[in-house]
Image: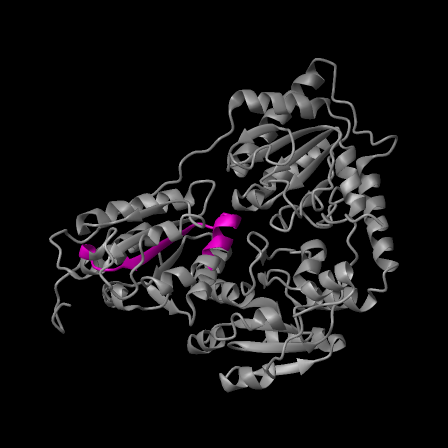
Amino acid sequence: MPEAGSAVRNGGDLVVETLSALGATTVFGIPGQHALGLFDALTRSDLRFVSSRVENNSAFAADGFSRATGQVGVLFLSTGPGALTALSGLQEAYATGVPMVVVASQIPIEGLGARRRGMLHQLDDQKASAANVTKSQRLIQHASGIPSAIQDAWTEAISSPMGPVWLEIPQNVLLNPVMVPAVEDALAEPFDNPPRTELVKEAVRWLSAAKRPAIIAGGGTRRGRGEADLLALAEKLRAPVICTPGGNGAFPWNHELSLQAWIEDRYTTEVLEDADVLLVIGSSLGEVTSNYFTLAPRGKIIQIDAEPRVLESNQPALGIRADAGQALSALDAALGQALADAVREGSPRQPSDWHGQAPEQVVAQTLQKVSARLDSQHLDMERQFMADIRAAVPAGMQTYWDMTISAYWAWSCWDAKSGQFHSAQGAGGLGYGYPGAIGGAVGLGERVLAVSGDGSAMYSIAELATARQHDLPVTWLIVDDGGYGILREYMVEAFGQATATELAGPDFVKLAESFGVPARRTAPDGVRQALVESLAAEGPNVVVVDARIGLFAPTHLAP
């Protein structure tokens, strides 16, 4: 350790200087013994540090910060248990394509390798533990390599497919004095990931000839900022558009071509199956998007994704490896030119024809069928509850949803309006909502809403201290049904009874108040007024609703 009061620059300074030069403003994490050089260096920088109470929540917060702002989330981790605890949070960022730079400390450099020297927090190969949940992993063994390694990691994180990148630096490399001059500038530009020309031409040929084109907009559409081109393309084709949970908000909710987000409904599945060309953008056609693998398209599929492993992983398709935003821009431009050429040549594209109906009619009738199906299931309380939340939340507010029944409803029925919808659908782990919202509030400097169940809330209850310490404008809606509600429903449906789903829990109002966070309790019919008042308040607050929320019946199971 350096002497107290020493002004000598060290490896930690190189880390924070490089991050600042790259445009970082905020760091999330928790201090640790081997990471002290990082945290000491923060005192000599303009970076804001936000300390969570558990490392996986720090990862969720960095994720939520990135989603809210479009910036890179930066995470500092200590060695061993601290680094490992963050992995579940990083799995969500990796699965959802959230750009993050993770700097983890390591034991002193002489302890690295196969030897077991008995050092505190020692792992055989720490970075190997992160291999499943990050794009790449690097060990930096010399201070002079720190700036370029961080610059490379930043570049990789923001290049599609985006995601978290892992760096680790031994304790003594962070602490030892360095001769490397202060970092003055750093440049990280994302690698270009455009679609191949011949694939665009082929896709345009298919779409130009299609009578019943339809579009699935996945999370890659939002990450690639392709919303405007998606709208233009859909209107040229007059193609119905449905958004996945990750793509929620990519297409205007009330547009006459919008099937909204009812991706788990058999009526919308049937429309997608009937399309003669199905354009899938930024989605793997995975479990939820395919209505639990019951989707059986009868037409051709064009699938666009930046991750090559996704292409054709679930359905044969014309696979186009590209950033979704770049691909949509190229498709829209090429299709516009093709349609103009066809008009000039006297052979304009024939109007869309869904068996004698216009696509707008098909969309309207399908949404009516969805509504009628819900009408038959005695879900008036649940539907009013979700409508009341939507009515209370300002149009531009960003919302963060945990893995809870309310979120499963929101996947299908939440109109993001001019805000953004964030959920943990990538990896599906509990505890994302509140720490993700904390990160969003830090980045935006404005109020956000988190929604959790009582089970998932307990994963992140300690972060009430974080919200209070930093006086963050986060309203936390906790729906308390006394257990793991969705698992209860699954088990009762499958086995006739639920096992190990019922939970003893705290009085969330008193618990929040013990952290100095104002809280109130309401019945479902009071949620709108409670949220209106809480969302208009200052600092953090909590709204607890005592309610057992049911979920609409699945449509992928045989009757």
Q: Is residue 509 magenta?
A: no
Q: Which residues are magenta?
A: 89-110
Residue 156 point in image, percent of width and height: 38, 42
Query: Is residue 259 at least partly visible in the picture?
Result: yes
Q: Is residue 108 magenta?
A: yes
Residue lying at 52% horizontally and 22% vertically, measured from the top left = 197
Q: Is residue 160 left or right of residue 396?
A: left
In the rendered image, the vertical position of residue 455 relative to residue 299, given as above or below: below
In the rendered image, the vertical position of residue 87 relative to residue 278, given as above or below: below
- Image quarter of residue 49: bottom left
Residue 247 point in image, percent of width and height: 61, 47
Nearest the camera: 497 or 410? 497
Q: How many marks?
A: 0
Residue lying at 78% horizontally and 59% vertically, measured from the top left = 552
Looking at the rendered image, the quarter that the N terminus falls into is: bottom left
Residue 271 point in image, percent of width and height: 78, 38
Q: Is residue 24 left or right of residue 379?
A: left
Q: Is residue 527 left or right of residue 157?
A: right
- Image quarter of residue 470: bottom left
Nearest the camera: 127 or 322? 127
Residue 193 point in image, percent of width and height: 46, 33
In the rendered image, the vertical position of residue 113 relative to residue 229, given as above or below: below
In the rendered image, the vertical position of residue 245 relative to residue 300, given as above or below: below
The image's colour scheme reads one colour
Query: Is residue 26 at least partly visible in the picture?
Result: no
Nearest the camera: 114 or 20? 114
Q: Is residue 484 left or right of residue 18?
A: right
